[in-house]
């Protein structure tokens, strides 16, 4: 199944599950009903990032998951990667081989170290504490590039 078809089918299924009519939903996300219909049928590729985000928000879905299904990466993530390309590329390649549960545990560790709730990008002064990640077997030792 191609990317266009997979994304479109998912949007159509979610829209139908939630009782959205094609025209009303298209208006809510700022596209024409004809365009949305062609996306849902896989005749057009997934739309630009802003429209995928609008679709995700209207359907109550995770933006990043729907963007990935559309073959896109959020522009804010691309900007973050550009700031530290070597380090973040290495980290992502390492994370690719971990289980989803291990990634979640590392994410929680990083979130606590960074200052709390998701979206809070405050930086912590001082070393990052990976002791519970080490204890739980998520990582064998803290990555060298972390403070």
Image (cartoon, rainbow, N blue to C red):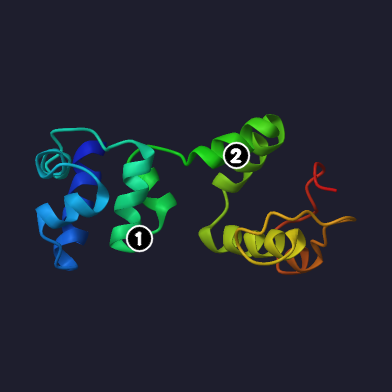
**Whole-percent x and y of residue 109?**
70, 63
Instruction: Say which element carries label 1.
Output: loop
Q: Which quadrant of the structure image shows residue 43?
A: top left
Observer-nearest of 67 and 52:
52
- Residue at horizontal 60%, vertical 47%? 95
- Judge the density around disc 1: few (<14), some (14-19), many (≥20) Cα neighbours within 10 Å: some
Mark seen at residue 61: 1
Q: Which quadrant of the structure image shows residue 13?
A: bottom left
Q: Is residue 138 visible?
A: no
- Residue at horizontal 41%, vertical 53%? 63
**Whole-percent x and y of residue 112?**
72, 66
Observer-nearest of 103 and 140:
103
List the residue tagged with mark 2: 93
Q: Tell me the quarter of the image containing the N terminus.
A: top left
- Residue at horizontal 63%, vertical 30%? 82
Q: Is residue 34 left or right of residue 72?
A: left
- Residue at horizontal 29%, vertical 59%? 58
Q: Is residue 140 left or right of residue 46?
A: right
- Of badges 1 and 2, nearer the viewer stands 1
Q: Label 1, label 2: how many angstroms apart (C-alpha)?
A: 26 Å
**Whole-percent x and y of residue 110?**
70, 58
Q: Which quadrant of the structure image shows residue 39?
A: top left
Q: Is residue 79 visible?
A: yes
| Earlier sequence position, callout 1 versus callout 2 | 1
49 in relation to 12, above or below: above
Mark seen at residue 128: none
């Amino acid at each position: 199944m191609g990317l266009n078809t997979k994304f479109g089918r998912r949007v159509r299924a979610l829209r139908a599950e939630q009782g959205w009519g094609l025209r009303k939903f298209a208006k809510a996300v700022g596209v024409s009903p004809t365009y949305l219909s062609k996306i849902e049928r896989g005749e057009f590729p997934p739309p630009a990032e802003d429209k995928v985000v609008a679709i995700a928000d209207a359907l109550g879905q995770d933006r990043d998951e729907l963007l990935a299904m559309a073959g896109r990466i959020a522009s804010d993530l691309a900007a973050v990667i550009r700031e530290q390309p070597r380090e973040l590329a290495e980290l992502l390649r390492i994370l690719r081989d971990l289980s989803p549960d291990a990634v979640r545990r590392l994410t929680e560790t990083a979130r606590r170290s960074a200052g709390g709730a998701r979206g809070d990008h405050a930086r912590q002064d001082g070393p990052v504490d990976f002791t519970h990640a080490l204890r739980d077997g998520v990582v064998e030792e803290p990555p060298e590039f972390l403070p």
